[in-house]
């Protein structure tokens, strides 16, 4: 949903409690101007989204799209060198954004024998040390990483942060994973980079638009693995998110501090 679709009911509106971590769809500027509170549901979803981030890394690296297609069509390639993928083992994984979701993903990679974890962002994160993740510039991250995981909010600063220029900086075997928002990526540029094998593959849980039309050209590519924005979609996590959002509403209506406020 874009902000043009929002309808403001009137001065009785006290709070918008979005059942999501991201709040780019909530028109924060307008809420601030109207003195309406905003809450989101961070942290309760981090591990569940992290599971999807790891799934996308594996799905793209091990070429699930092509392999599933072979199973469905009954045309399996038989042979020693068929549909070869890439390992997480020994790789460098770079996180653009190392908040709750990035860190939860790094924790889940502990058993995969990853060689190096790096992250970029506005500042170093104290939690990174215990995860063995090194703070680097975004440019360095793009140049070094075999896997690049986007886990940042969508803002004016991050919109299209992955574009023809940043894609050109990546390694030829790079695998781009996006669990943030579709608009972090210039999809035209991504299409070109995947089509020409400038990078190896991509795994996306988020696209622009959503749903992605079934004839969208990204879906013609064998080296992309796309999920329909299911990052936090488990029974347990959606339930935790709903309860947290409801408690934020109760807090707002009873004059208590919000549990997870978005500072507007
Ligand atoms: O995309 C989902 C969220 O922001 O929680």
Image: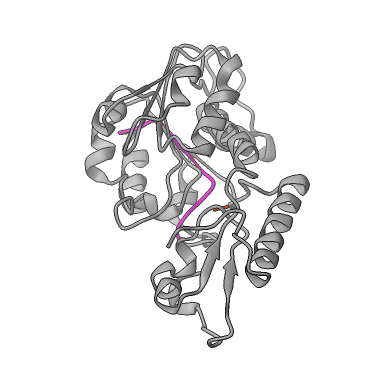
Q: Taking the image as drawn, is residue 139 in sight?
A: yes
Our reading of the magenta stretch's main secondary structure is: loop
- The answer to whether 110 appears left or right of 171 in the picture is right
Instruction: From the top left corner, tell me how far across and down residue 161 is, in percent.
Output: 30, 47
Number of callouts in the render? 0
Residue at screen point 32% across, 44% down: 162
Instruction: From the top left corner, tell me how far across and down residue 90 is, in percent.
Output: 46, 11
Instruction: From the top left corner, tell me how far across and down residue 101 is, in percent.
Output: 53, 38
Per the rendered image, the range of residues in magenta is 198-208
Residue at screen point 44% across, 16% down: 91
Q: Vertical placement of 113 versus 46: above or below?
A: above
Residue at screen point 29% across, 52% down: 157
- Asked if residue 201 is among those painted magenta in the image, a careful observer would answer yes
Instruction: From the top left corner, tell me how far across and down residue 113 is, in percent.
Output: 53, 11
Residue at screen point 38% across, 50% down: 184
Quarter of the rendering occupied by the C terminus = bottom left
- Asked if residue 58 is among those painted magenta in the image, a careful observer would answer no
């Amino acid at each position: 949903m874009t902000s043009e679709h929002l309808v403001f009911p009137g001065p009785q509106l006290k709070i918008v409690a979005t059942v999501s971590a991201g709040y780019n769809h909530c028109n924060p500027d307008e809420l601030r101007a109207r003195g309406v509170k905003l809450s989101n549901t961070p942290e309760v979803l981090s591990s569940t989204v992290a599971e999807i981030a790891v799934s996308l890394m594996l799905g793209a690296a091990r070429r699930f799209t092509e392999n599933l297609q072979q199973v469905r069509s009954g045309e399996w390639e038989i042979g020693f060198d068929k549909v070869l993928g890439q390992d997480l083992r020994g790789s460098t994984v770079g996180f653009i954004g190392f908040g709750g979701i990035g860190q939860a993903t790094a924790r889940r990679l502990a058993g995969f024998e990853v060689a190096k974890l790096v992250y970029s962002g506005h500042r170093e994160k104290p939690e990174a040390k215990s995860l063995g993740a090194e703070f680097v510039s975004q440019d360095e991250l793009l140049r070094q990483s075999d896997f690049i995981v986007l886990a940042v909010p969508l803002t004016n600063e991050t919109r299209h942060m992955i574009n023809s220029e940043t894609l050109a900086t990546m390694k030829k075997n790079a695998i781009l994973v996006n669990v943030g928002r579709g608009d972090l990526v210039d999809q035209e540029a991504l299409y070109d980079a995947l089509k020409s094998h400038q990078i190896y593959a991509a795994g996306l849980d988020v696209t622009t638009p959503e749903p992605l039309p079934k004839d969208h050209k990204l879906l013609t590519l064998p080296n992309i693995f796309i999920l329909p924005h299911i990052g936090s979609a488990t029974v347990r996590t959606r339930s935790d998110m709903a309860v947290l959002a409801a408690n934020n509403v109760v807090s707002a209506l009873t004059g208590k501090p919000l549990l997870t406020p978005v500072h507007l």
